[in-house]
Amino acid sequence: MANVNDTALLDVLELLLTAEIYNNSSTLNEDDLPPNIRKHYWDAKEKKVNRPIKVVDSDIRAIYNLENASSIMSSLPFVNFDEFGSIYTLTVLDLGTKWFARKDVNERIHKNPVLAYYYQNYGTIDVDYKEVRARNPTKESDKAYVEGLTKTVAEEGDEGVDMLKLVHVVSPDEVGQKLDDIVLTPDQEAEVEKIVKAIEYRDYLRKIGLREIGKLLFVGPPGTGKTSTARAMSARLGLPFLEVKLSMITSQYLGETSKNIDKVFELAKKMSPCILFIDEFDFVAKTRTSDEHAALKRAVNTLLKCIDDISLVNDGVLLIGATNHPKLLDNAAWRRFDEIVMFPLPDTDMREKIFKMVLEPIEGKFDTKQLASMTENYSGSDLRLVVREAVLNALTEDRTKLTQDDMVRAVGEFEERINLKLNDGQSS
């Protein structure tokens, strides 16, 4: 096992090699830099990593939490440390890369596109630069990148600030739930993969003129994973996530609703590439055939026009609408989406998979088949609430180990609450 100093030495040398290679290769860009290095050197105002990258003591402390880098690196004859400026430089790149390659660094090279690029072209290590780069999170994945974009928008003045008030912006690396944490149907998985490929081949789609792609409508009852899946797609695709609830931008100042919708779509283009997730899509769309306020009807027309004018291929914006009430949408709304993704209540097999996934980190033995059979017409969100109830009940008895009886009892309590709500609704 390598000691702490060996690891620290390789950390700093990897940084120095990455900086030197990046500085001298115009074919490499920010998406080639490992996330920890890119985040540190990211210039939010310029929206890039400026060349040349210089490595000083404060950089090493910030990236690796290392205080004594100069003494650790003093053993390497090809590394120079200028005490006056606290700057580290490589005196001979070739010596540095050869020395580095002789160490146990295969994993490092296969996680660092800059090094993979160098060793594939100039070294003797078997590595595929394109594969390594494809696995590397893009700059859009970084919180620093998203914060830089929002700051730039805010600096545009009151209009920019107003835009940001209308949406909730999340960076991909802040998304807690990943696609692997969600039980999807085969059709849902297929649609996600289509979008992954559409983004990968955006230039090709633009070249052949196939632009009407990347507008999805998620349809299904509450709690079936529409929002969770959209957020998880943000993490999978490495795209900032912009969430807007239509009720929030139409509940006040009706005359401003159309302007607000325009601002949301304008912001999405400024934040491109990104995902624009419009929840409660039926809130506005349903008014198209109603006798409600004329301003809302204008807002519907604005919304439909904005959808027409935005494109994944041209603008880099993946549009996802979500509705719990598809019957409220008219044909004009349906036609705007090239894919309809259904989110039905989970069947018995899916419920069992969800229970297995949620219960996996909890100590105890469970009959998930029985639990699945007891929870017909439960949403995925309901199933998680059942598990939460069982955990909290056990904690009141100072237990962290659960039993099947705990789970069965929690299902019963959940059923009682549902019946109370139903009876209360009928009596009112």
Image: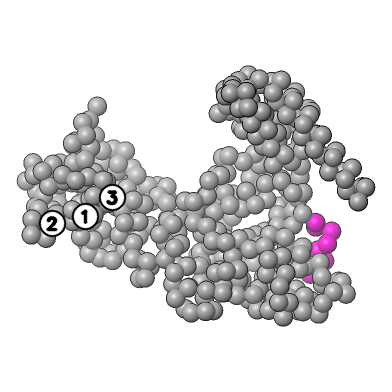
| Residue in view at x 47 percent, y 51 percent | 173
Which residue corresponds to mark 2? Answer: 86
Which residue corresponds to mark 1? Answer: 58
| Residue in view at x 40 percent, y 49 percent | 136
Q: CA distance from mark 1 to mark 3?
A: 9 Å
Secondary element type, mark 2:
loop
Give whichever of discs 3 and 2 has the lower sequence position. 3
Q: Is residue 373 left or right of residue 47?
A: right
Q: Are marks 1 and 2 in contact (CB under 8 Å)?
A: yes
> Is residue 148 visible in the rendered structure shown here?
yes
Could you say where residue 175 lies in the image, as x and y percent from the top left?
52, 49
Q: CA distance from mark 1 to mark 2?
A: 8 Å
Q: CA distance from mark 3 to mark 2?
A: 16 Å
Which residue corresponds to mark 3? Answer: 63
Could you say where residue 98 lies in the image, as x and y percent from the top left?
16, 43
Per the rendered image, the range of residues in magenta is 325-334
Secondary element type, mark 3:
helix
Could you say where residue 62 lies in the image, as x and y percent from the top left?
27, 51
Q: Which amino acid is tagged 3?
A: Ile
Rendered position, 127 above or below 196: above
Residue 320 in which image quadrant: bottom right
| Residue in view at x 63 percent, y 63 percent | 244
Decide whether residue 326 is among the magenta residues. yes
Give whichever of discs 1 and 2 has the lower sequence position. 1
Could you say where residue 11 lies in the image, as x and y percent from the top left?
24, 44
Q: Which amino acid is tagged 2?
A: Ser
Q: Is residue 90 left or right of residue 353?
A: left
Decide whether residue 424 is among the magenta residues. no
Sort mark 1 into few (<14), some (14-19) or many (20+) by Cα contacts within 10 Å. some
Give whichever of discs 1 and 3 has the lower sequence position. 1
Rendered position, 392 above or below 308: above
